[in-house]
Image (spheres, rainbow, N blue to C red):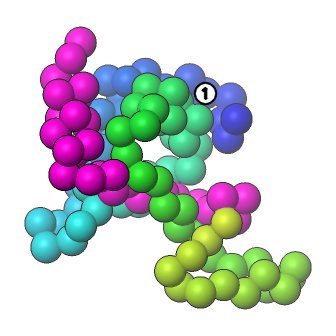
Amino acid sequence: MTSQNVYSKEFLKGEIVKHVSPADESSIAKGLDIDYLYDFKKHFSGLFRIVYRGGSDYINRYKRSPYYCLQKYAKTFTIYPRSDNSFHRAISAWEEK
């Protein structure tokens, strides 16, 4: 678990809306706080591909490609559709209450 807080599905939907990616990017939303990750996975299991974002840890000699980050060093995450089909499933799940 990344946080002791519990984030509701409605709260996470609001955060996705606040962090929607520009139309010319393939991601759906970016810059989501890593503290949301546990509850995000619980509420949206299997609907999105998650990519971790964050800095390198130079103290521990962790140098990384700018396109790759380990979860333990991540500060934020970005969500992508798994495929066109899963994007439509995600939208359907989004509309469910």
Identify whether 46 is placed above or below 5: below
Q: Is residue 81 magenta?
A: yes
Residue sitting at 21 percent across and 17 percent down? 96
User: Can residue 30 be seen in the rendering of this structure?
Assistant: yes
23 w.r.t. 62: above or below:
above
Q: Residue furthest right?
A: 60
Q: Say which of 55 and 64 sits in front.
A: 64
Which residue is tagged 1?
5
Position of 17 compared to 5: left or right? left
Crowding at dot 1, Cα within 10 Å, few <14 / some 14-19 / many 20+, comes out as few
Query: Which percent across, then down, holds residue 82?
Result: 33, 52
Quarter of the figure with residue 58: bottom right
Quadrant location of the N terminus in the rendered image: top right
Residue type, label 1: Asn
Residue 29 in sight? no
In the image: residue 30, left or right of residue 90: right
Q: Residue at x 72, y 59 (%)?
A: 72
Residue for point 17% across, 28% down:
92
- Which quarter shows the C terminus? top left
**Part of the protein shown in magenta:** 71-97
Work out whether residue 51 or residue 76 is closer to the camera in this orientation and state it: 51
44 relative position to 72: left or right: left
Residue at screen point 46% across, 54% down: 50
Q: Quadrant of residue 88?
A: top left
From the viewer's perspective, is residue 83 above or below residue 21? above
Residue 53, position in %: x, y? 53, 67
Is label 1 in a helix, a strand or a loop?
loop
Residue 9 percent location from the top left of the image: 37, 24
- Looking at the image, which is closer to me, 48 or 38? 48
Furthest residue to the left? 23
